[in-house]
Amino acid sequence: MRAALFTGPGNLDVVDVDTPEAGPSELKIRVESCATCGTDAKIFGHGHPRLEPPQIIGHEIAGEVIQVGSDTAGFSVGDRVQVIAAVPCEECWACKAGKQGICINQTSMGYQYGGGFAEEMIVPEAVLNANGVNKIPGDLSFDEAAVTEPLACALNAQRLIRVGEGDTVLVMGAGPIGCLHIRLARALGAKHVMLADINGDRLALSANAVKPDRAIDMSAEDLEAIVLEETGGIGPSVIITAAPAGAAQEQAIGMAAPGGRISFFGGLPKDKPMISVDSNVVHYKELILAGANGSSPAQNAEALELIASGKVPVADLITHRMSLENVRDAIEAVTSGDAIKVVIKPQGVTS
């Protein structure tokens, strides 16, 4: 079969590999859609400490079951499924406490297990043990189902900071995850949502799709002044930094309303992980700062239902569909900001 094999930084080639067979406690799926994200771009450019090449990457996966292991129950050939990315062990203290997203033994599709940039893929026993395979409801497309995993990550972040009715929300970063945060905040009851970015072209593309109440081009406008104007001089009750920028995190602390909640969603570069924080601002404004890392299998299932129900539409966020052979072009479209969401179609792109 054909697969995109990562062999080291800058090396990602579509090659022929052995077609896998499902073991007794596994499934095999024909991959129909595998969405790309910024993490794929990071892996392509720099590798990842948890990924040992060679490996088939891609972790936003949807497909059809084509083989069911002899000891695997609950699935049949022909089932349309979506697969989690981060795989909890279900045994450590974090998993037993219901915090699978921070499992200390976490493994991942496209890292320790072959991923979705391939014509076929094995769903390992660990994924099934974690309830990590969701049947795609109704006539929801494979492409839309493939966006479940990043939405689950956004859901994890917004649950941690309790986004809800009446919130005013600022999302800093207008990439695909920023778009999902805007849509999700509205679905959870936010009354006013704002989207900001330093890249005016990317902001225009994303704002045209998700239509925030205010789009702010940080390269040409005064973010803090506009945010204060939009919130009656109070500041947002919620700020989500959906970009890998320390400056955004610092700004968020300064702009948040008293009692505000801030999600540090975008991780910082490993060589620039430090920011400056005025602790007294956090103290006197009683701010809540929360990290966000991945999602749980239950959040994946909830995210799929949000998409299927129409509460969080994603079809219009998929701006590009590309064949497996064009996986490098897909990653370039993600990093350049020319696309919102790019979906790889290992079985071929149909018009």
Image (cartoon, helix red, strand yellow):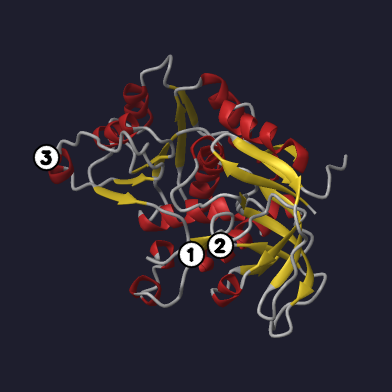
- Tell me where residue 88 appears, x and y as whole percent: 47, 68
Q: CA distance from mark 1 to mark 3?
A: 34 Å
Marks 1/2 in contact by CB < 8 Å: the verdict is yes
Mark 1 is surrounded, within 10 Å at the Cα level, by few (under 14), some (14 to 19) or many (20 or more) other residues, namely many
Q: Nearer the viewer, mark 1 or mark 3?
A: 1
Q: Residue at x 51, y 38 (%)?
A: 42
- Tell me where residue 284 appears, x and y as whole percent: 13, 43
Q: Is residue 83 above or below residue 12?
A: below
Determine whether the residue tagged by mark 3 lies in a helix, strand or loop.
helix
The amino acid at mark 3 is Asn
Sequence-first tag of 1 and 3: 3
The amino acid at mark 2 is Asn
Residue 300 is tagged as 2
Relative horizontal placement of residue 113, taking residue 99 as reference (left or right): right
Residue 188 can be seen, yes or no: no
Q: Nearer the viewer, mark 3 or mark 2?
A: 2
Residue 18 is tagged as none
Relative horizontal placement of residue 262, taking residue 183 as reference (left or right): left
- The residue under label 1 is 296
Residue 280 is tagged as 3
Mark 3 is surrounded, within 10 Å at the Cα level, by few (under 14), some (14 to 19) or many (20 or more) other residues, namely few
Determine whether the residue tagged by mark 1 lies in a helix, strand or loop.
loop
